[in-house]
Image (cartoon, rainbow, N blue to C red):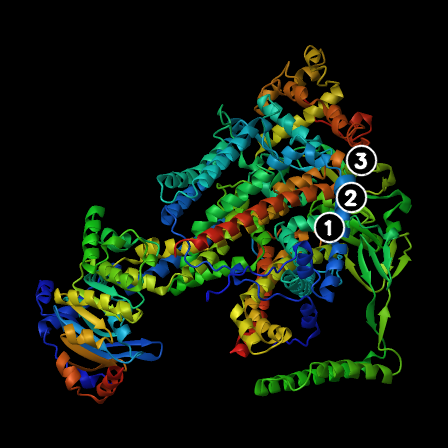
Amino acid sequence: MSGEGVSGCIPFKGVDMNQRAAMDEHRSVVPFWRNERVLKVLAQIVFVILVLAVGAWALTNYLERGLKFSYSFLDEEASFDLAEGIEFSPTDPYARAFLVGVLNTARVAAIGIVLATLVGLVTGIARLSKNWLVSKIAGVYIEIIRNIPLLVQLFLLYFAVIMKLPQIKEAFVLPGPVYISNRGIVLPWPRVAASFGLWWPFLVVALIGAVALLIIRGRSLKHTGRPSFNLLWVVTPLVAVPVLGWLLIPGNPLLLDLPEMVTKSGGVLKVEGGTALSSEFTALLLGLVVYTGAYIAEVVRAGILSVPRGQTEAARAQGFTNRQILSLIVLPQALRVIIPPLISQYLNLTKNSSLAIAIGFLDLYAVSQTMWNQSGRVVEVFFMIMASYLTMSLTISFVMNIVNRRMQIVER
Amino acid sequence: MKVKASTPLVRFFLTLDVDYNMPYDLITKLEGGIMMKGKLCVLFAGLLVLALILTACAPGKKEAAEEEAVEAVGRLQLVKERGMLIMGCNAELPGFGYINPAGDFEGFDIDFGKAIAAAVFGDATKIEYRPLTAAERLPALQTGEVDVLNRNTTWTLTRDSANELDWAAVTFYDGQGMMVRKDSGWKSLEDMAGATVSCTTGTTTEMNLADAFRSRGVEYTPLLFESTQDTNTAYEEGRADGETSDKSQLAALRSAMANPDEHVILDVTMSKEPLGPLTAHGDNQWNDVVRWVVWGIIQAEESGVSSKNVDEMLSSKDPTIQRLLGVSGEMGTSLGLSDDFMVNVLKAVGNYEEIYERWLGPEGINIPRGPNRLWNKGGLLYPMAFR
Amino acid sequence: MQKEKLETAEDIIICQNVHKWFGNFHVLQGVNITVKRGEVVVVCGPSGSGKSTFIRTINRLEEHQRGNIIVDGIELTNDLRNIHAIQREIGMVFQQFNLFPHLKVIDNITLAPIWVRRWSKEKAVQVAMELLERVGIPEQANKYPGQLSGGQQQRLAIARALAMQPKIMLFDEPTSALDPEMIKEVLDVMVELARSGITMIVITHEMGFAKEVANRIFFFADGYFVEHNTTEEFFINPREERTKSFLSQILTH
Amino acid sequence: MDLRPEVLKPPRVEVGLLGWLKKNLFSTWYNALLTIFSLAFIYIVLRVIITWVVHDARWEVVVINLKVFMIGRYPREEAWRVLAGLGIVVFLAALTWIFRGAKGSPVKRWLMIGWLLSFPLIGILLRGFSRENRFLPLVSENVWSGLLLTLVLAIVGIIASFPLGVLLALGRRSKLPAIKVICTAYIETIRGVPLISVLFMSQLMLPLFLPPGLRLGTVMRALTGMTLFSAAYAAENVRGGLAAVPIGQYEAARAVGLNKVLVMALIVLPQALRTVIPAIVGQFISLFKDTTLVVIVGLLDLLGIAKAVTGQREFIGLHQEVYCFIAVLFFICCYAMSYASRRLEKVLGVGER
């Protein structure tokens, strides 16, 4: 102990042995209500007991109603039907119904996040455009969308726009063909053919090659400060190898499945083939993308504006071109500001997808409502809903936080 | 993770020619704020007090007292003391329960509520309506939030036994049907292979629909909505090929469509749907009041007493009419009401026929009376004996 | 009975073998010091050596984990009564002033006397005005701290600390956040204060101030007091190598 | 010789409208292209909208139901009470506007008291006393609907959630692990799930967990849900404000001898809350928009009433008109509020520093 050496130089003249004894005694008799350390522990215990007491009180009230808490209903036959998402029949158990809902929500959220980011980026940058008209159009879009409740927008979209599209017998047919009616949109979609088994190794090779090139490029960027080759070098093998494979193997590995209008035995018109987006899904997706896009636009704009003017001035003084300033100086700094609020917009989009119930899309919440109505197990289903949304929220913030951290490290 | 100018996306943005030298002041960071005069902690304390006051405004305590009262003296006494009947109802079903442009509830189900209010208070306006969704209607009654629920609710064994509810009577015999477009040419469910059917979720309808198609081995696509109105909109706009619901509802909905003649209700009954008012389990006296008001209204039609002739009928020699109108006997007293309660009811809403004609007849949404005729006219309405 | 006896003691602050850790970092490694009533002590030492942390343990802004601290006969324990008593005896002036920006100058000073000492508002204002006179800024009473210059702010901070009529004043580098032309006005107030007989512990590198008023100078490094001495001796004849090298660094500037 | 520099007028940079057009719309060839494209876009959109608004839309559904939209099922003979409540707010707002410059005058204090009193006063005015009361008969909050209900939900939601939010924020910043963990868990759970599931909890589950004797009406339950939800967000806002208070403020307050409660009440919260005012206004706007979600649990707020109106026989299926109308109504309210809050932010920012 290095302090011992000097202790000799400061004699303790002021305190005699009596006083020391008194002090020791004094310390041992601190009553608990004045003892800071004890009080800290006590405060926590009291708080926890209070919380537990409220919980216990609620639980007693629940039990007094003679209600049971059990998840055994999940194995029972659902006996209702669900049309959206993965295969489901009324004989399937409740658990599968819930899975249908979870997957539907995940689908709408995943696609929505990608599209909303694109819309937000374009609009946010358009808002900063030097072109007065473009900037004003973006501004009007942002202000209108942000100041109207999402649910009102969904009602407008679904009941006042999509429902008013032509009925299926008069469906719009766009070249492709793409069928648009108030039943939804049917698009051509690639379908796996017999020779796909021969082709997919080419895909894998191309992907691995592209990733490897990206890593090499990243390394050289780190060491030399400049990329060793253009991004085109990465894209070329990614495209060229699969095309080569396509030409080499016999037959087409992928076929384009074209939608087609057919008349069923009962006289029902149906568009078969391709991939179908139901009108409920389309309305929800569109609503979420347009709404969240407006918010992301603001995030992007604020991010770009947050880069201090001095940064661009310094770059200009060093002779960078406008383009280089944007890509090397402004965007990397702006991204650090953009990502945290972007995460919360992604979370909002996921949570807002629960409004699906108002327009008949079978998301997690809508399926859950059917489940508790038909099984009567309100509390059990509620906990399942909470757990699912929390899991999704945590997953998104986990992934985005990793991105965020990498971003910050690159910059330092 | 760097964004490069060479990526196509960024290149695209570059053409938009960003003015990234825009003034920085747009992102105002508020650091200190101004020194407002009044102390903010006073404001804070004020808000707290305010929150408490608002909480105190909540009816919690008073209704708690009501709850204790109901255990002691019964719902009838409670309703009388409150001076107001609270009825759970539908707010968006044409003909049965909806809000008119004046903001008032009206419809077939609503009239039975008015009748109960007239029976208890002699005043049909002493009633408050609680619009309830299909999902929340039963809990609302169980927890005592409403005195009576009259919201096209099907009398089923499970609901009657497991959910602690008691039906009072049947006001309307219904069955689940299917409405389709006339030009589809469909006559039965078997014809409807591949059809999309819209349906309200959280009801027995949803399950009956699945059962009906499954038992016939017909493939179909359900389209589920939370409210009847949305279910109907989806069908009417051609989003669905068929709509399923209770036949009465289908008729009501059809009547409100732009071209009612283009739609037909198939001659298929997927289920029995006896609808009527219900009360919380275990309060027999209150349940009796509701049920005898309903039966009284039916009996009035059978005896030919209506809102127009009720005053003349007071001097009728028919003993049934005398008992019904409280001229003789103490029917009302034994229910806990005044003896002339049916006079008040009939003056307020009329007999079953009048109510039916008003809302469901040709002037209303036009549903043929079908099984809802009197027993002696080939229907199912059979009031128990007034004696 | 014991308390009375302790109060009569000549040493107002006694620290014995005080230790503190921040996580694994051993900030205070057995600090020993006694300060007499009315003494002015200057503490100097390299930055990051823990001298700030040390004076903050004296009025419980930081909690020490081992050892004894006795202030005016009251031991600093977990006893809330002792903690409050000690905090009332000690005033503190910070490097960054830490004035309350939402309160006027006069309210900054009267806040604690009114809420802690339970003085009437009139009395508190009267005392506050006297203190403002003493530190030379009576005309600023109705302004907000943000409207004062740095030197005025620090003098206000001293007045605020004095308002609780402490027996001990702690100064944590009171002039290092000030522009050079304002240092003197603050030091003048401190010199006046030192001569009034209040006990002071001052962390500062203003060696002129130290020479003028300090009774003793302590040299603090690596979490303990390396050396202490009377002012003259400290400058003329430092004992330890570390002290010498430190002095050569700060005095050449 | 005069060595003074010649005083010149600055050269003219802009040449009227043409100069402006050239600079802002046609500076480069792609900008010109963008401008032309945008003009075409605006033309098409405006033409569609104007044609519909002027020719095709049947606005009588809105005109006839205007009162229904505003106060819904509030009894018509009692509608004056809503107007009176509105009058109080307008009166106070006008006074606040007139005296906005009068700093430190006693009028401001009275206005503050006036605002504080106005909320319970309006509450009593709207709800009344008992059914028998001749002057203010009871209008149960369960019949409040339309825009009135939307406003009540938003205003009461934000006011009631604020104290709770402050407590939660303090709890989350507490050094005591148990308190911190519980408060954090609450805040993060609520923020991690959609509002609709919280409303669902308050509507359907709350009654199950309350003692059989205690009952809340639907509106009260929705309010409970909104408050619990909003409190978590308010807590995060307040936490931001608390973080903006420098640590030196805590230390200085402790050093002058204030105890922990006084430090919070006199030093930290007054500074923290002032910085969160803009955030709270923003939260109010989103809460105002979020009130529409109560339609999913069966309440008749503005959106719920709109839905009911589209079900009226004579106007069935007029979704476009009705939803457009309430969209515009919401836009006006929200835009006005966010405009006001931006102004407020500027005023606050320019204040004394």
Q: Which residue is mark 1?
A: A158
Q: Mark 1 or 3, which is nearer the eye?
A: 1
Of B158 and D331, the residue lying toward us: D331
Residue at (22, 89) in percent of width and height: C241
| Residue type, label 3 | Ser
Residue B99 location, x and y as percent?
A: 67, 34
| Residue type, label 1 | Tyr
Taking D351 as reference, is D334 left or right?
A: right
| Residue type, label 2 | Thr
Residue B258 location, x and y as percent?
A: 82, 38
Secondary structure under tag 1 reads helix
Residue D303 location, x and y as percent?
A: 64, 43
Circle 3 Cα neighbour tier, 10 Å, few/some/many (<14 / 14–19 / ≥20): many
Which label sits on residue D51?
A: 2
Of D313 and D242, the residue lying toward us: D242
Taking D279 as reference, is C141 left or right?
A: left
Q: Which residue is mark 3?
A: B255
Taking A127 as reference, is A198 left or right?
A: right
Report if residue B55 is visible in the image: yes
**Relative to A353, is B370 above or below?**
above
Residue at (80, 44) in percent of width and height: B236
Secondary structure under tag 3 reads helix
Mark 3 and mark 2: Cα distance apart in space: 31 Å
Task: Single out the residue that lies furthest toward the front.
Answer: D1
Chain at tag 2: D
**Relative to A313, is B26 above or below?**
above
Mark 1 and mark 3: Cα distance apart in space: 24 Å
Circle 1 Cα neighbour tier, 10 Å, few/some/many (<14 / 14–19 / ≥20): many
Report if residue B58 is visible in the image: no
Task: Single out the residue that lies furthest toward the bottom.
Answer: C241
